[in-house]
């Protein structure tokens, strides 16, 4: 499946030779690709509270400008070169979700979102580098991409977005609809619209060490259970009442030293952390949910599918759905692993009573849909 997407090379070879290492240009990665949304839909989304968006433009004398959405329609009635970008298109549109999940040769745990941009003639976000891998898929229109392996990654101080101070293009290509460019982290690049054009970016997540450690500590405190209390029988008369005695520091050190974690704590943290919906994501339970019996009959015919906003990961017998650990009975684990891998399950004729109740709860929460196709 991924061979065409990767220009005829296998996913194994891509991961071995290109992933996190060097750029890859693929002509006709998605032949006949027309994009998943129109220019007008992108502009509309940029004005919507549900979407995360940005408008970027460059004035010859005033430099770079950026405005965060939601935008007003009049912000988008512009002349000159500009671009509007909408993050998380996969959360808003099923086709966008399907496009993002075509990249299944990278684990879902590394996948972030699908962004779409519309750029007017000459528009773009300027020369920059990203800290993440990205696949840039050309939608309608054409875009010139310039890239460089330069080591000088100094950015213009004070600019509203990260623009390289000295960008020296080493290679460039004009991408046509359906062409794709893979860039590893820190590869300098600049994309310039030729006529109005749309670009889709498949973005990945690679949390910063500081972020992941901080979040682990937050997770740990929810599960921490330390008994006892500070005590100091036999307290010696202090020479300096204002001094923190070394005895007190040692006793508190003993308490802190009882904070313990193991590989399971790390696994559970990771599962919850990576499936946690972004702060602006809310699930919509079905307006008129089917009753349990009707639900069972429906999924027996049509199966189930994760809602595009849902994230389900697993590690062995442990399952994580939208930021929570979920208990899955042993008999149903294979099915739920398949649901995680493929994001859908075909006709579910005879789920056990516990699995049925579990899927029904997920359906009522808006986490899954009773239609796997
Ligand atoms: C875009 O403008 O669509 C892509 C932004 C980027 O270069 O990362
Ligand atoms: Co970029």
Image (cartoon, rainbow, N blue to C red):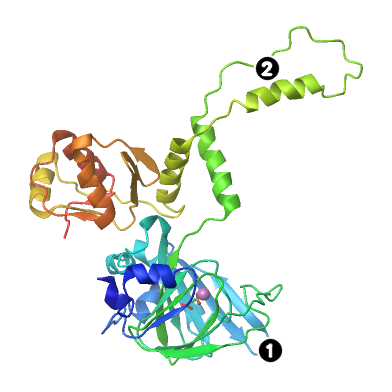
Left/right placement of residue 121 relative to residue 10 reads right
User: Which residue of the protein is positioned furthest toward the top in this rendering?
Assistant: 234
Residue at (51% x, 39% y) in the render: 219
Q: Position of residue 129 (x, y in %)?
A: 57, 74
Residue at (32% x, 76% y) in the render: 9
Q: Position of residue 266 (x, y in %)?
A: 47, 40
Query: What SS does tag 2 mark?
Result: loop
Label 1 crowd bin: few (<14), some (14–19), many (20+), radius 10 Å: few
Left/right placement of residue 369 relative to residue 296 reads right
Of the numbered discs in the image, which one, if any, rests on residue 198?
none
Residue at (73% x, 23% y) in the render: 250
Left/right placement of residue 157 relative to residue 73 reads right
When the figure is inspected, residue 22 is found, relative to residue 173, above or below; the finding is above
Residue at (48% x, 84% y) in the render: 77
Question: Where, quadrant-wise, is the N terminus in this rendering?
Answer: bottom left
Real-space Cα distance between discs 2 and 1? Answer: 64 Å
Circle nearer the N terminus (2, 1) = 1
Q: Nearer the viewer, mark 2 or mark 1?
A: 2
Residue identified by numbered label 1: 61
Residue identified by numbered label 2: 230
**Where is residue 61, by image quadrant?**
bottom right
């Amino acid at each position: 499946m991924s061979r065409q997407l990767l220009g005829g090379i296998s996913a194994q070879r891509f991961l071995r030779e290109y992933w996190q290492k060097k750029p890859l240009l693929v002509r006709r990665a998605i032949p006949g690709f027309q994009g998943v949304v129109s220019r007008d839909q992108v502009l509309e989304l940029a004005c919507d509270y549900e979407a995360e968006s940005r408008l970027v433009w460059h004035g010859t004398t005033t430099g770079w400008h950026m405005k965060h959405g939601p935008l007003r329609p009049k912000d988008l009635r512009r002349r000159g070169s500009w671009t509007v970008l909408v993050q998380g298109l996969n959360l808003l549109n099923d086709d966008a979700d399907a496009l993002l999940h075509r990249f299944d040769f990278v684990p879902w745990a590394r996948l972030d979102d699908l962004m779409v941009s519309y750029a007017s003639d000459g528009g773009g976000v300027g020369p920059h580098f990203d800290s993440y891998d990205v696949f840039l898929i050309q939608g309608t229109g054409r875009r010139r991409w310039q890239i460089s392996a330069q080591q000088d990654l100094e950015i213009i101080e004070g600019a509203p977005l990260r623009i390289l101070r000295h960008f020296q293009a080493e290679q460039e290509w004009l991408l046509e609809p359906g062409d794709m460019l893979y860039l590893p982290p820190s590869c300098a690049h600049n994309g310039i619209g030729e006529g109005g054009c749309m670009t889709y970016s498949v973005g990945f997540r690679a949390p910063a060490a500081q972020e992941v450690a901080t979040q682990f500590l937050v997770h740990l405190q929810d599960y921490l259970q330390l008994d006892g209390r500070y005590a100091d029988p036999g307290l010696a008369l202090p020479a300096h009442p204002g001094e923190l005695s070394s005895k007190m520091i040692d006793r508190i050190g003993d308490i802190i030293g009882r904070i313990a974690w193991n590989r399971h704590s790390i696994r559970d943290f990771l599962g919850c952390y990576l499936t946690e919906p972004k702060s602006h994501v809310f699930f919509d339970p079905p307006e008129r949910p089917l009753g349990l019996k009707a639900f069972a009959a429906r999924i027996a015919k049509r199966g189930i599918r994760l809602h595009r906003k849902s994230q389900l990961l697993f590690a062995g017998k442990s399952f994580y759905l939208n930021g929570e650990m979920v208990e899955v009975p042993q008999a149903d684990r294979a099915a739920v692993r398949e649901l995680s891998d493929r994001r859908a399950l075909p006709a579910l004729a005879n789920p056990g009573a516990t699995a049925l109740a579990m899927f029904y709860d997920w359906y009522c929460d808006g986490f899954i849909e009773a239609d796997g196709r």
